[in-house]
Amino acid sequence: MNKKYRAMQVAAPGVLEMTERPIPAPAPDEVLIKIEACGVCGADLRDTEKAPQAGQPGRIPGHEIIGYITRKGGRVPDIWQTGQRVGIGRLGGYCQQCKPCRSGLFHLCENQLTPGLSCDGGYAEYVVMRHTALIAIPAELSSVHAAPILCAGTATFNALRHAGARAGDRVAVLGMGGLGHMAVQYARHMGFEVTVIASGREKERTAFQLGAHHYIDALSEDAAACLKEDGGVDLILATAADSETLSALLPALAPRGKVVLLGTGRTPLQIMPGMMIGAERSLAGSFVSTPAQTERALHFSHLFQTLPVTEQLPFEQANEALNRLKMGKVRYRMVLTMNQDN
């Protein structure tokens, strides 16, 4: 094995550069992973906008990592073996000691690492990571398909599972991007009646192909009125950061209906308390899930073939991938691949 590896690091806000670094040795509770693929997520755009700290190497972005364990520390449990294919999502390993961890809320760990933000991520040939972040990858899934499920997939899958909706309920998915196109597939196979709300007709055909029963163009139609005509919806899964559209949709919730927020934004929601109270509607956020829950999302994706629609680029072209994502030209998840011979 070579003693150095290549990586794309942040050189300036929004700009990556190729670098070469010594291959690190894992600490006792870490593993060294040889990366095969890494998905490109909207959060990567925000991560790469952070300027490198003076005197420190630029951060390596990326948190939808698939690769093989090549070395493990002495405290890594035997469920993880050298040569095993594993994944790393947005969460880089919980501490097992804080109050949320001791309560079993590992994804809410107060000392969680964040690949690409607080520790180096997957736009590279190698990465070291805590063993508590590891996710087992089913043999039946390709690395390119599995990578986006580690973030966009598990986020939408678990939001739907934990929202309280039941088979036959009406679910509206706001946004038809990287998260939304996964949410549509999961919702359909969970037995919901699925409506997609998006801006324009460009994604309508794909929405129906992926399992939507209805499609609303929020640019030319009154989305709330359309939903009300059919009796309202039991759940709105907001995958897009569109506070204005979402605020207008709240009255379309059925009594005891629920909104689950996934897409982040800086514009506040406009909510009339009486409208929420009178029909006992609710609003909640949902974070990405634990490694065990992500493994369930991966299994579901294989079982029902709810797979991300992907484009691929070699990781050397990470700047192009981020630029395409910023311009909204990715359909629907970009995956960087590493062709390594060493």
Image (tube, rainbow, N blue to C red):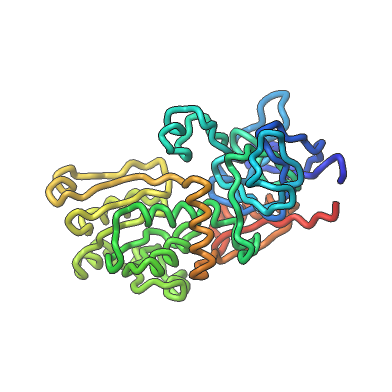
Where's residue 297, x and y in %? 49, 57
Whether 76 is drawn above or below 257: the answer is above
Query: Is residue 308 shown above or below 39?
Result: below
Q: Where's residue 124, x and y in %? A: 73, 46
Tally of numbered tags: 0
* Whole-percent x, y for residue 310 in the image: 60, 64
Nearest the viewer among 171 and 218 is 171
Residue 28 lies in what quarter of the image?
A: top right
Between residues 182 and 1, which one lies in front from this camera angle? 1
Residue 320 visible at all: no
Residue extending farthest right:
2
Q: Residue at 28% of width from left, 69% of height from top? A: 168
In this picture, residue 251 sits left or right of residue 33: left
Relative to the observer, which residue lies in front, 211 or 110?
110
Q: Is residue 11 left or right of residue 89?
A: right
| Residue visible at 35% across and 69% down in the picture | 191
The residue positioned 43% from the left and 38% from the top of the image is 105
